[in-house]
Image: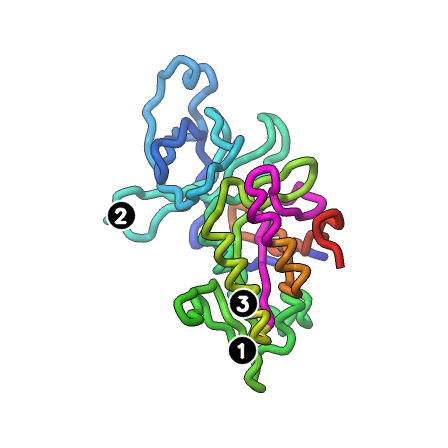
Amino acid sequence: MMHIKVLSFEKELFEAKLIQRERRFFIEFVHKNVSDAALAAGEYKSEFAHTNNTGSMLGLIKKGRSILLSKAENPARKLAYTLEAVNLNKDGEKKLWLGVNTSVPNRFLQQLFLLNPAFEYTLLPFAKDFQQIKMEAKNGESRLDACLFSDSGKKAWVECKNVSMVEYDAAAFPDAVSERGQKHLETLMRLKKQGDRTIMFYVVQRTDAACFMPADFIDNVYAEKLKKAYGMGVEVYAAVADVQKDGIYFAGYLPLAPCYFKG
């Protein structure tokens, strides 16, 4: 499928070089014209950017890596930049951007829903019979990322997750033990038993994966719950989001690894 721009950045992303992750929500960086020799010698003036990614970002935080930053529209914000993507390739190779902004999946889903009719429902196949979407939808004490509504009163509950890790050509989630993610799966299974459609929507913000699987080598409890949920009829989709300097593009869906998703 041809890449379709789903989200646009108001200003083209700013390329820089990563120094390190400083505590949980801060990234130290320098401008991209700082040489590797200056980095090695510590001869640089660094700045800090915000990251909303609370995951481990396993294997991504390496000094000297190219990164993409967006600039905040609010001039009063403490940190002017937000980390959007990390380059996975070596210097001299074509950039392969991995999106790490965890607010993207919800916005990506919402915009795909709005664009869906114009593309004959190929962007979100599961949303064909639904006319409305509500983000941050509550069900009792539970809150899921979205709920789709049809004119006939049907509902489809959707939970979004950001996928940043690829192992052996497979996009894998989660990259750290996720008790919160386990609870979301329990909620989806409960809602499925009640008769609603339920969907796990994984947004893989990189283009180098061949399939999707649960990361049982990171969180086996999550993996077992996902397999159980799938067996009960919870739908699983892994959408590819291609992050570029001007925006984020829809690049199709990954197949589900058959050794995990049988049915």
Q: Which mark is nearer the camera, 2 or 3?
A: 3
Q: Is residue 158 magenta?
A: no
User: In terms of depth relative to the viewer, which is nearer, 125 or 75?
Assistant: 125
Which amino acid type is marked by label 2?
Arg
Label 1 sits on residue: 149
Using residue 204 as the reference point, say whether residue 54 is left or right of it.
left
Q: CA distance from mark 1 to mark 2?
A: 37 Å
Quarter of the image with the N terminus is bottom right
Q: Which mark is nearer the camera, 3 or 1?
A: 3
What is the number of the mark on residue 77?
A: 2
At 45% from the left edge and 20% from the top edge, which residue is drawn?
35
In the image, is residue 156 above or below residue 177? below
What is the number of the mark on residue 190?
A: 3
| Residue 139, picture quadrant | bottom left
Which stretch appears magenta? 197-225
Query: Local crowd at mark 3 within 10 Å, few (<14), some, or many (≥20)?
Result: some
At 63% from the left edge and 64% from the top edge, which residue is drawn?
234
